[in-house]
Image (cartoon, grey):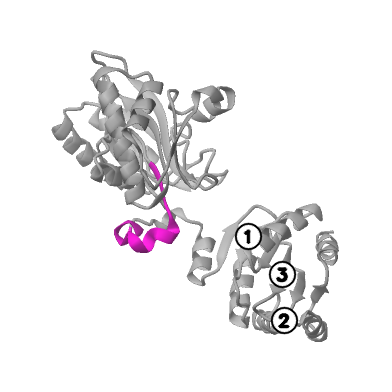
Amino acid sequence: MNIHEYQGKSLLSQYGVAVQRGLLAETAEEAVRAATQIQEQTGTGWWVVKAQVHAGGRGKGGGIKLAKSMDQVRDLSSQILGMQLVTPQTGAAGKTVHSVLIAEDVYAPGPSPTQEFYMSVLLDRAKGGFVMVYSPEGGMDIEEVAEKHPEKIYREWIDPTIGFQAYQARRVALNLGLKGQAFKEMVSFCQNLVKAFEGVEASLFEINPVLKTSDDRILAVDAKVNIDDNALMRVPAISKMHDPREEDPTELKAASFNLNYVKLDGNVGCMVNGAGLAMATMDMIQLSGGSPANFLDVGGTASAERVAQAFNIILEDPNVKAILVNIFGGIVRCDRVANGIIEACRTIGDLRVPLIVRLQGTNAVEAKSLLEASGLPIRAAVTLEDAATAVAAALA
């Protein structure tokens, strides 16, 4: 589950991670009140207006602006609220901005220059632990740094059985070139960040930038946090942070039916049982000249009601030109799946697109006979090659 920047900062601060202070606003008037309150708390005369959407690259898309007066806070908030923010991570359609974070300006000049770093903590499944990824070159162009200067990307692996050690935190601060008070602040920052990562059951913490201020404080200026969906039952307070406005409506609908659905950009709808078979099916569609329109795993059951729900969700995508059902009947019998497909087709009526069905496993022969005898426009396939040929013909 993804959460917003302001929510991520709230979680970080609970574990002692110093963050850029700010308040949420959903209207321009609320933004001005928030700016006034922040000024009273911090003494700042400048504010940062930050669009709250689940996507990176907001600055490049015009979703983060510096306001140097209350009038600018009002005007910039009005401009950002309601806009369709397009970033490299949103796609061409962008995302609607429903709220903004009014944050203090933390780049004021002082005794030493400010510095921006990149830092993230994430799961490393290959090593069976966590890894802290960090760089002295933080900011909006971190992707370019990783591509052109990989030697500036450091990694610190964390063994979950013994935890993040003090010497590791000191090594991070050393690699970032810090000294004196800033060095001590960074050591504490890293230790608290890892505690927060473990405490909230996260799969990713990404802070870009981590800022060394002009008075040698270390702050999280941004916060991208992903929570492990399988752990939400252990952190019910965090599960309430879910913002359905940030999710694809079709994916939310599928989730309400306990269907694993992810929308893609292709023209062939897929209904499969099992993630591995789904990936192989999508490869086969691509090789046959099509492109998968979705990932949809119906799981171990394929009742008529469940199949009908899956078909309706697939058909909500106007780009779908054909549907391919590829089911392996291991636990579930193929003839029962076939009956479910037939009943679902009769319930829905006109599918409007060709339907190709491949059922293999227990009672596969009987299933093929049922499909052929149904009188419905269903193309029954036996092998993957047959299914690929049928998909190509449907798209021709």
Three-letter code, disc 1: Phe
- The part of the chain drawn in magenta is 224-240
**Residue occupied by mark 1:** 295
User: Residue 176 lies in magenta, yes or no?
Assistant: no
Residue where numbered disc 2 is placed:
338
Instruction: Point out the residue furthest to the left here.
Output: 40
Instruction: Decide which of tag 1 and tag 3 comes sooner along the chain.
Output: 1
Report the residue at 26% width, 35% height from top.
Answer: 18
Residue drawn 81% across the image and 74% down it: 380
Q: Pointer 3: what residue?
A: 325
Q: Residue 342: percent from the left, percent from the top?
A: 71, 82
The number of discs equals: 3
Among numbered discs 3 and 2, the one appearing first in the sequence = 3
Mark 1 → mark 2, Cα distance in angstroms:
21 Å
**The image quarter in which residue 217 lies:** top left
Question: Vertical placement of 58 versus 324: above or below?
Answer: above
Of 33 and 375, nearer the camera is 375
Q: Quadrant of the C terminus?
A: bottom right
Give the secondary structure at mark 2: helix
- Residue at (39% x, 56% y) in the render: 243
Task: Classify 10 Å Cα crowding around label 2: few (below 14), some (14-19), many (20 and above).
Answer: many
